DNA sequence: CATGAATGAGAGTTCATTCAT
DNA sequence: AATGAATGAACTCTCATTCAT
């Protein structure tokens, strides 16, 4: 019951932080929306700051397992791996855009160093894996001699650009406010297709 | 003198907002850092919110003029235009990454509708121009039949991904904290080169 | 204990508002005098404005019950009823002149519409009752054909004139500042006697 | 020109103080409404407080001359004098209800002692004259042995009660908000008639 | 284990006033 | 003589947090 309540608070917090930002969300708002007592946040997490850290750690597993699995797979070609990562990455982010937005929000703010560091650790791990695959492809001469770091920036950046603001996305897609790109399956397929085409064109020899 | 002071406050505000976020920055912090009286912010701008809007409008010209000029030029090919836009866009963002970060921060937060709307207007204008060029290239059959909106997402997203967090960028670049990517000319050239390659590979026929 | 604290704040507020006016009283003054935390006012009442409204409602019962009782009494003559109302009215106002002054202060200020309206409601109810009695007396031909509204203005106005300013009252009574008319029983009797005489002379036939 | 400007500011101040109270009126509001510079108030009057005092002194003459004249007149009977005072008093107050309300507002607030004192001086003078006439009438046995101070309270209080709040007056008169009692000649006649009847009934023998 | 009451700090904003010109 | 810019103090209100129960 207690664990459920903690999780419940964290999930509501993710929603609210994504909506209004960390600073813009008050503990009272959070307690009200989660239907718990105001004191519960400090009771469970010690402070609002540490609630945020708890959220980051709680979700830290992120793509960890899947990425390791893909990297280790010996039967797939490098380009197959990249494609699979694109699919998984898009799926993962679209499955919880709120959390993704919260993470990025924090990356934009240089204060709260400890959180910053924690979030970076997650990204570093993922980046390293992707980098390994690209370099392997380059070594095997199936990939062009590309800029591996900026290739990742392109991959992640493209997704982020569409994911970070629903409003921005709707402007891009020429849809009105009622369209929710995060749950629309056509949009998801379109995004995956575009990413594969871009990466293939840039990465694959001939 | 007066104009200078207003501008001074706006510049300090851009710095602080980029560092600590809009909500995270107090008017008192701002006044202290800008070395002006607390009341000056409200005296000049009416409110903290309207200070933000003033900043957005102050910087709104952004790439406006340049983009219009490029679009209207009849001597350049479409791919030359795209290349020029990449160069200008990278130069512009790198020249004031703080402001760029502030804009993105606000886009992540769905509250404060009026700001949101103002910021989106700026982006929409730029996006429209880029879209026109891509569609013209497709029509002339020098470009492949691509996804124009997501192409823009790739272009802008790649830059953002490197620009939004100095720390993140250093992780990508495998540099330590002392390296400032925003002022390093090699990094700039590298980013421009990468973007051109990606866009060319994806966009140009043959 | 909680109820006591709320009541305590309201009572201190009545004192201070009467002394310095609503606008002239700061929440900090109030908190200091009541020996509570500054935040308590907003915690209990939501805002300074709503504190005032709470006070008005808290005291709204005013003469409500008594007036209804007197009006409904079938054994008393109209003039007896008027006399009783005079006695009660004088007693009530003298028992809490501070509050009475606060109400009048707010009536003088046209801003803060909602308060205005709430206060007027209280007066209207009381006025209606008094009016009914006078009109009944006129109908029964024991009262002259008088101006019922202005009769009320005379009754209430006379009391107010003596009640609203201790200093003014002392000037009227040719007493020095140390004399407190509100607690002096002789003054009370004198006021009641005068009012009865005026009203009788004006109202009663023959 | 300067004197005009000072007077202009005072007149606008009277309006605003009457509308929103002394504390509720900001120097900026006042400057804006009077269409002068913010600094003018302090420039001309030294401070907001001293502006108030200047207003009181500026208007201090009040009924002075007329009252003295009436008192000194040897051809009129005491009751004729009283009637004339009623007429003049009602006329005077109705001619500038804003100022009258401002004075009363200040009497309700015990702070700002010096203003208090100044205002009281004005009233004292008027009260003294009225008192003399009543006592003369009592001495001549044309008046009953009344309570002279409270008689004045009745006279002034009745007028105040109708004058102080337009809203209250409308409730009394059963009119809606659009009715302005201060400029309606019928209301004025009605008030004078009522006051004479009350005072006659109470004061005059037989 | 959980809570409603209570708190001090700090938020944005407005104020009357002053000062350089 | 007159003003627009600028100020420091104080305003109401909200915040994350604590504490007695």
Image (spheres, coloured by chain):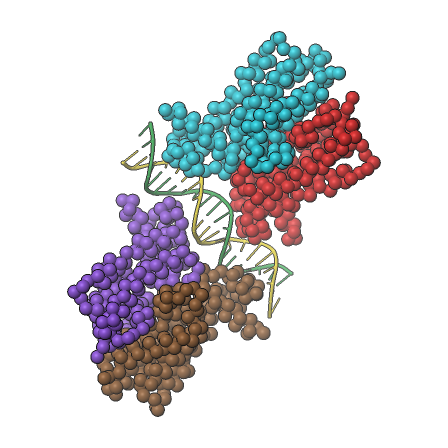
Chain colours: A cyan, B red, C purple, D brown, E green, F yellow
Measured along the vertical axis of the image, is residue B193 above or below residue D96? Answer: above
Q: Which residue is most to the right?
A: B75
Looking at the image, can residue B119 be seen? yes
User: What residue lies at 42% left-to-right and 57% top-to-bottom?
Assistant: C112
Instruction: Classify residue F17 as left or right of residue A155.
Output: left
Give the quadrant of residue A169: top right
Q: Which residue is most to the front?
A: C139
Q: Decide which of E21, D92 is in the foreground and name it.
A: D92
Looking at the image, can residue B190 be seen? no
Instruction: Classify residue C114 as left or right of residue A108.
Output: left
Give the quadrant of residue A180: top right
Measured along the vertical axis of the image, is residue C43 above or below residue A178? Answer: below
User: What residue lies at 45% left-to-right and 31% top-to-bottom?
Assistant: A12
How far across and how far down the image is residue D106, in percent?
39, 66
How far across and how far down the image is residue C64, in percent?
26, 58
Measured along the vertical axis of the image, is residue C72 above or below residue A48? Answer: below
Measured along the vertical axis of the image, is residue D165 above or below residue B53? Answer: below
Q: Quadrant of the C terminus of chain C?
A: bottom left
Q: Decide which of A35, D42 is in the foreground and name it.
A: A35
Instruction: Classify residue D180 as left or right of residue B102.
Output: left
Count numbered badges in the picture.
Answer: 0
Q: Which residue is most to the left?
A: C75
How far across and how far down the image is residue B20, in percent?
55, 37
User: What residue lies at 29% left-to-right and 77% top-to-bottom?
Assistant: D198
User: What residue lies at 59% left-to-right and 42% top-to-bottom?
Assistant: B117
Q: Quadrant of the N terminus of chain C?
A: top left
Q: Which residue is most to the bottom?
A: D75
How far across and how far down the image is residue D188, in percent?
40, 75
Q: Decide which of C65, A54 is in the foreground and name it.
A: C65
């Amino acid at each position: 019951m207690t664990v459920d309540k903690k999780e419940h608070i964290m999930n509501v917090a993710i929603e609210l932080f994504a909506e209004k930002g960390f600073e813009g969300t008050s503990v009272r708002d959070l307690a009200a929306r989660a239907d718990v007592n105001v004191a519960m946040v400090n009771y469970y997490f010690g402070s609002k700051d540490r609630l945020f850290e708890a959220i980051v750690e709680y979700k830290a597993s992120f793509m960890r397992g899947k990425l390791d699995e893909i990297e280790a797979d010996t039967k797939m070609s490098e380009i197959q791996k990249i494609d699979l990562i694109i699919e998984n990455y898009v799926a993962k982010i679209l499955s919880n855009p709120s959390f993704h937005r919260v993470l990025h929000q924090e990356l934009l703010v240089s204060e709260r160093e400890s959180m910053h560091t924690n979030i970076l650790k997650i990204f570093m791990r993922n980046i390293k894996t992707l980098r390994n695959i690209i370099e392997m492809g380059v070594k095997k001469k199936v990939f062009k001699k590309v800029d591996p770091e900026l290739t990742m920036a392109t991959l992640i950046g493209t997704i982020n650009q569409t994911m970070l603001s629903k409003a921005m996305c709707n402007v891009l897609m020429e849809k009105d406010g009622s369209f929710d790109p995060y749950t629309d399956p056509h949009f998801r397929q379109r995004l995956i297709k575009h990413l594969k085409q871009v990466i293939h064109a840039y990465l694959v020899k001939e």
